[in-house]
Structures are given as structure tokens and as C-alpha cells.
Amino acid sequence: MDLNEHLRQKNKNYKSQNDNNNGGNGDNGNNRNRGFQNYPKMPSFNIPNGKKMATLYVIIILVALLFLLKPFTIINSGEVGVKITTGEFDPTPLQPGIHFFIPGIQKIIPVNTKVRIAEFTSAEAKNFRNIDEGSIRDKAISVLDSRGLSVSVELAVQYRLDPLGVPQTIATWGQNWEERIIIPVIREIVRNVVGSFPAEELPTKRNEIATLIDQRFRDNINGLENRPVQLESIQLTEIVLPIAIKEQIERVQVARQEAERARYEVERAKQEAEKQAALAKGAADATIIQADAQAKANRIISQSLSNPLLQLRQIEVQGKFNEALQNNRDAKIFLTPGGSTPNIWLDSKDTQRSSAVGQ
């Protein structure tokens, strides 16, 4: 029924009834008429017909279903989408953006492809570290060394899913693929590698152990079908040894330091002795060289002496004696046995005695 027509018919009936009341009551009717004219008019509404109403209802229902069923998924950056149609995985991953699906028949699973971290650490360390998005925290790996001693190993593994192979990975391993590919594998490899060393050698062979764990884990991951995971790095953060082994290592280190110190002292004493020997040898060599030089000089002098030269030297010495006798009359001249040159001896006492006699 048309609402406008209904309102007009109702208004017409109201006016006719009002006119009848005015005719019967005279002035009272006129007053009522004037009062009725002051009433505001009722608004008119344009109500759509049946087809338009049906279309409007359909649109409203579709919008409501769109928000209730939400037949779309937004894939963020660092993710890929896996579309599943009636249980079958689409092998092509969905890239970041908005993607629609048919509710009840299809669904889309967002999968994180960013670098993830699996940490194997102690409960005390967990309390002091922040938990990053996408990371896994598990307890430290307990290992028995080659002699059966218990050792605790802490490490961190960084890895990520291969974006192109995500649908195959989820279809094969499920959404909890880390519990099947990462956690048990790394635990087994750590136990095999660390268990082949005695506990006291673990601190000194830390780099070698970390390299072996990394290599074996890469070989295991690369051996899986479609290579679902890309290993970024493995950091060996801590090796917790038994207290007895720690004390033994400390004693060995102290003994080693003492041995190094003793070796250093012996080496220093040896070097000092070699230095003194070198100095003594140098002094002896210098004395020998000096003696050889003096002997050589004497030989040269002896070879250069001749009779005319000796006579000349004798005349020079005699002249010096004459000068000495002129200046010191009390001087005495004597010849030394076997000497070729006379010596002059001045006695100061004789000089003082002669002076006293003269007075």
C-alpha cells in the first residue's frame, strides 16, 4: 500500500469530520478550525516500491554477510598466504595484499617467512631476555660427555621458511613444522657432537664444536625434500660444566700458569747467562786483540831500530842528563845493571843537608 496515498486519505477524512463539527457548533467550530490550521503539516515520505525494497534488502544482507563471514584475508609484508580449497593446498603462495576466498569451501592461512629464532636456554636466562615475535624458547640441552658426565648446552638457532615452498612445507609438515624439523633435530645433533668430547675439553674446543653443529644441521636441512628451511646461523652461547670439572679445569689452569712462569724464569736466566758469557767473551777477545796489537807494535818498533837510531837516542838522552846536572848539582848518576841508559837520582835530603852545612 502506498503510504502517501494513505496519509492523504486520512487527512481528507479528518477535514470532513472537522467541517461537520464546525457546522454544528458555530463559533466553536470556527475556533477549532483555526486551531487545526495552526497544526504543522505531516511530512511526506517517498517509500520505494516492492522491487526497490527487495533490491535494498539483498544489498543489506550481502553487506552483513561480508562482515560476518569475512571472505577475505590480508597478507602482510614478511608473510605468504596458503590457500586451501576443500582440503587441497594451492602450490602457489599468495603474496602480500588482500585475497578473497569462498567461505566454507576455501580458506587462506597466513604464514610468517621472517627470520625466526629457536633458543635453548636455562630458566634463569629466560627471565632476563625479551621474547621476540616468532621465536621459540626451550630448555637447555642436557648432554652426556664421552665419560658419562652431565653437561648443559645453551645455543640459539636462526632460520626462516623458504617463501616459494611454504605451501608444500605446510602440506607435508603441518603448521607446527618447527616441532618436527627444528627442535628434535637440533637436540639430536648437539647430543651427538658434544657427547664425543670429554667435558674438560669443551671450553677449549668451543669453536670446533660450534662448527660441527652448524655443518651437520645444514646437511640435515638440505637433505629434506624441497629444502623447506633456510638456516641463517647457529650461536653456541654457553656450555655449563659440572662443578667437579670446573674445579679440575681451574687447577689445571693454575698449574699451567705456574709452569709457564717457571719456564719463563728459566728462559730469562738462560738469556742472562748467555749475555754474561757473551760479555766475558767480548772482553777476552778485546784483551787478545789489544795484546796482539801491542805485540805487533813492538815487533814493528823492534824491526825499525838500528844502530844509528840508537846512537841518536843516546845522544838525546845524554843531552837531557847534561841539562839536569846543570840545574841540579847534587844529582847522582848511576847505571842500572844491564841498562844501556844511565839514570839520574835526586836526593832531597842531601840537598837539605848541604844547605845546613853551608849555614
Image (spheres, rainbow, N blue to C red):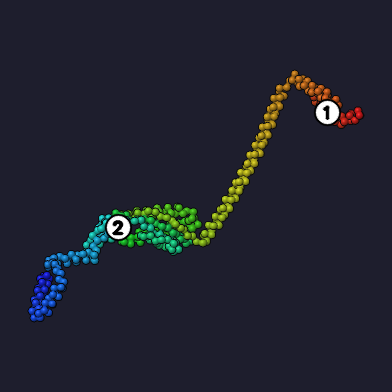
Residue 200 percent coordinates (x, y): 50, 57
Q: Residue at x 40, y 59 (%)?
A: 119
Residue 302 percent coordinates (x, y): 72, 24
Callout 2 environment at 10 Å: few (<14), some (14 to 19), or many (20+)? some
Q: Is residue 98 visible?
A: yes
Q: How many marks?
A: 2
Q: Residue at x 47, y 56 (%)?
A: 197
Q: With respect to residue 354, does 113 lie above or below?
A: below
Q: Quadrant of the C terminus?
A: top right
Q: Is residue 185 visible?
A: no
**Residue on which disc 2 sits:** 76
As drawn, the residue found furthest toward the bottom would be 24
Amino acid type at image mark 2: Asn
As drawn, the residue found furthest toward the front would be 27
Residue 185 percent coordinates (x, y): 38, 59
In depth, the one of 258 and 23 nearer the eye is 23
Callout 1 environment at 10 Å: few (<14), some (14 to 19), or many (20+)? few
Q: Quote the CA–CA distance across marks 2 and 1.
A: 124 Å
Q: Is residue 195 left or right of residue 27?
A: right
**Residue on which disc 1 sits:** 345
Q: Residue at x 23, y 62 (%)?
A: 71
- For mark 1, give the secondary structure: strand
Amino acid type at image mark 1: Trp
Q: Is residue 16 left or right of residue 355?
A: left
Q: Which mark is in front, 2 or 1?
A: 2
